[in-house]
Amino acid sequence: MTTEERAAGAGAPAGPLVELVGIRKAFGDLVANDGITLDVRPGEIHALLGENGAGKSTLVRVLYGLSRPDAGSIRAGGRAVQIASPADAIAAGLGMVTQEFSLVGPMTVTENVVLAGSRLGRVDLGAARERVRAAADRLGVRVDPDAFVADLSVGERQRVEILKALVGDCRVLILDEPTAVLTPQDARALFTALHRLTAEGMGVLLITHKLHEVVEVAQRVSVLRRGRLTATVDLATPVSTRHLAALMVGAEGLSDPAALGASEAEVTGVTSHPAQASHRSQVRRGMAGADEGRAPDEARVPVTPPALEAYGVRVDGPGRPVLDVDEVLVRAGEIVGVAGVSGNGQTELVQVLCGMRPIDSGRVLVGGADVTHADPMARIALGLGRITEDRRGSVVGVLSVEQNLVLEDLATFRRGPFVDRKAVRRHAERLIAQFDIRARPADAVRTLSGGTMQKVLLARALARDPRALVVAQPTRGLDVGAAAYVHEQLRARRAAGAGVLLVSDDLDEVLSLADRVVVLFEGRVAGVLPGGADPGEVGVLMAGGAAG
Amino acid sequence: MRLVERGRLPRWSGALAVVAAVAVTALLTAGPIRAAGANPAAAYRRYLFTPLTSGTGVAEVLLAATPLLFTGLAVAVAFRAGYYNIGAEGQLLAGTVGAAAVGIFLPDLPALVALPLAGLTGAAAGTLWAAVPAWLRVRGHIDEVVTTLLLNPVALLGVQGLLNGPWRNPETGFPESARLGPGYAIPALLGSRVHWGLVLGLVAVVVVAVVGARTPLGLRIAAAGHAPDAARFSGIRVGRIQVGSALVSGALAGLGGAVQVTGVQHQLTAGISHSYGYTGVVVATLAGLSALGVAAVGLLLGTLTVGAQNAAIVLHLPPQMGDIITALLLLTVVAALVLRRYGLRIRGAT
């Protein structure tokens, strides 16, 4: 959309349609939104880009009144508004289309639309039908107002959701990952329809993690990372997907404020800075070398036996496999990182390796032994250590720290038929000292903070001296000190000869620790790079290999 | 208005919650008791203390508590593993049929053989009755709450069918079985009506308590019940533990049935279970699924039962008043425990 078109938007006021100012929202010790300020202007599609867990959903939940912010304010049409419920949001001119549609299948399109805005009293279906037709005309789509929603395709249902918002007189339409459920054709039709709305002066807030969508359809993009606004970029001049990928995953070489300017400043056409990026990775290599006395991507140390192997592993999902990797190989004494935009098969890979999810084909080996059909117990016995992203799904909250520490290993802590409670206590006290766990042995794990809980898991996995270690999101939600401690432990494992598979959404973490980096995209291995690789290059692979 | 989880709480707050629940129950039942024409304070004395003031009273209390030990324990064992067996009633009835069957068909066995055989048959019958829902749960993900519950009336109809058909008493013609052989009577304790079944129940309480608190299996069961995903992650075979707990639960309830047949009735009657299986759910819940708690609550409800009979005679209170107090106590205790863990917060406060 050109500036002329935007200015021509039906008498649109100059100011923003909606503004979020300094929004902060924390869940316990996890800060999901940290001082986020952004606005949606008339006639623009404003993309909100970020990985899963970056805070996008929390932000729109706050905006739509589904969640109360801890701090910050919302302005609509230049006036401060209190949005405590979706009803308030609708009154403030907002409309939202979520990924799970809120439609009633056995009712018609018109009835669904009426339902959205109905008050008590008589319903004039005839007039409602006309309003649906008018809204469909605005959107430039054909919708039969009397069709039953259950008979509609997913793309059509999404249009009905948009019609609901339009009939509710919304001025800003919020779309949460709208193309996740659409075919490419439906997605194009959606964007055509959205452009008609913005031409009228409406604003659209488009939540997505698909980079090419942002570049193709949005006028501006705000990038969230770990709850913070990394940058708001004007797309009037071309910006590469590589650059956006770097902003999203936090590859420091490219998100340098000096290269970007302040977040409010519009960055024009910054692509990658190969020189700078490679300088950065040189620096990192140097640091890693100093840390470890080894340079990750220098010529390999003598080839060591494999600690963990996966070949041709496939997990079928609806439509296409959610995981389909040819080979993931971790040798003794190395850290292999797994990078990728979250939701590209990392979770499934970890579940498969840990024995928590059956595979549809392929083989998994731990220390050379085939464990494809082995349960978690057998894998643990063969020397597999696991630290998964779902901390609360890995510990039993009501049990104590000491009980959780021996849960995988009860057979060795018994005296006759009973649990040897003294041995359990000694074991716990030793690990508490060794791993600096800030808890007493008898404390219920439920009462611990995320960082302490993570240390319990770390201690449990490492206490068995595993030869293969699968680690997922080990520092998510941890403070800097705790994260550094976790990294130190992983390096120590590597030095002790264990093979470590590190899965993380934090590209900095992967690049600084891993000897090799496997990049996953849509469940497949998009490429394998040496550790300390150029973050831009990793970003391209993460974005599906789209040229930057 | 919404519930917000409180932080860590001192241990005594649990006891405080129970005391508060008892007080609230007393307040709520005072009205109906007065409406029924009795003094609430006097009524409570009848319900809770009078039964314990005489030897026969205590004996009656212990007798009433005996089946509740078995069914309460049965429910607690299953619930702890995350298997919600509501079918202790049916499993107890199956146990009575099993024990009665050997007593009817092998009437001449000596006590040393007869009693263990009756107990084992009863436990086996209870296990069988529990096995079908357990199998359906693990194989077909069919909710055991529904299946175990619905099998209770089936068991009762089975008992009635037997008593009105093949097992009808040949001498009296009443719908009750013939009396069991003389070897099938559990000896009485101290010359009262209380029998050794009580001791068996207490032994079961101790065994369950020790296994739960002191053994690796107990830890695994706790993990499987509280956090099945984490348990699976830790290599614990959750399905196996739940099926095992379901079967042990059925066995305990069935054993309770066998004890009622051999210790009290000495024959099978249609009214042999005074809803012991359902009350078992109340006992286990009030006990917080603790085995020792089951013993304590079993005795409390036994006292209330005997007290209600006493109050019905002396104060002319309807005998159902005891059930009303029990039910209200369950509700208030559950509510008090929820409010102990979660605070009420009025909407809007941040």
Image: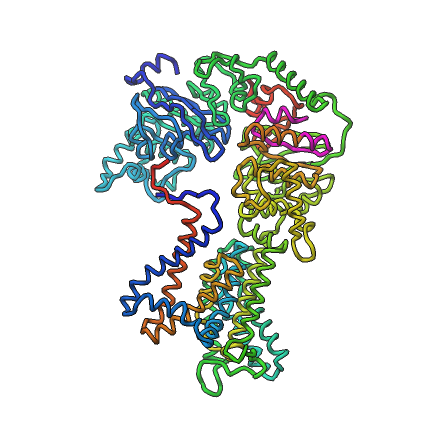
Q: Quadrant of the C terminus of chain B?
A: top left
**Residue A96 occupies which quadrant of the picture?**
top left
Whether residue B233 is visible, yes or no, is: no
Residue at the image position 43 percent from the left and 53 percent from the top:
B16
B104 within the magenta span: no
Q: Position of residue A145 (x, y in %)?
A: 31, 36
Vertical placement of A429 versus B43: above or below? above
**Residue A135 left/right relative to B168:** left
Q: Position of residue A390 (x, y in %)?
A: 55, 39
Q: Is residue A304 left or right of residue A107?
A: right
Give the extent of the magenta segment.
A491-516
Percent across and percent down for residue B53 are 43, 73
Q: Is residue A513 magenta?
A: yes
Which residue is found at the position 30% from the left and 22% from the top?
A: A77
Q: Quick check: can you spot residue A264?
A: yes
Residue lying farthest right?
A302
Observer-nearest of A404 and A365: A404
Q: Residue at x 70, y 22 (%)?
A: A297
Q: Position of residue B301 (x, y in %)?
A: 44, 66
| Residue drawn at 61 percent across, 78 percent down | B114
Looking at the image, is B207 positioned above or below residue A141? below
Dividing the picture into quadrants, the one containing residue A287 is top right
Which of A125/A46 is in front?
A: A46
Left or right: residue B139 versus residue B22 is right
Tell me the quarter of the image containing the N terminus of chain B.
Answer: top left
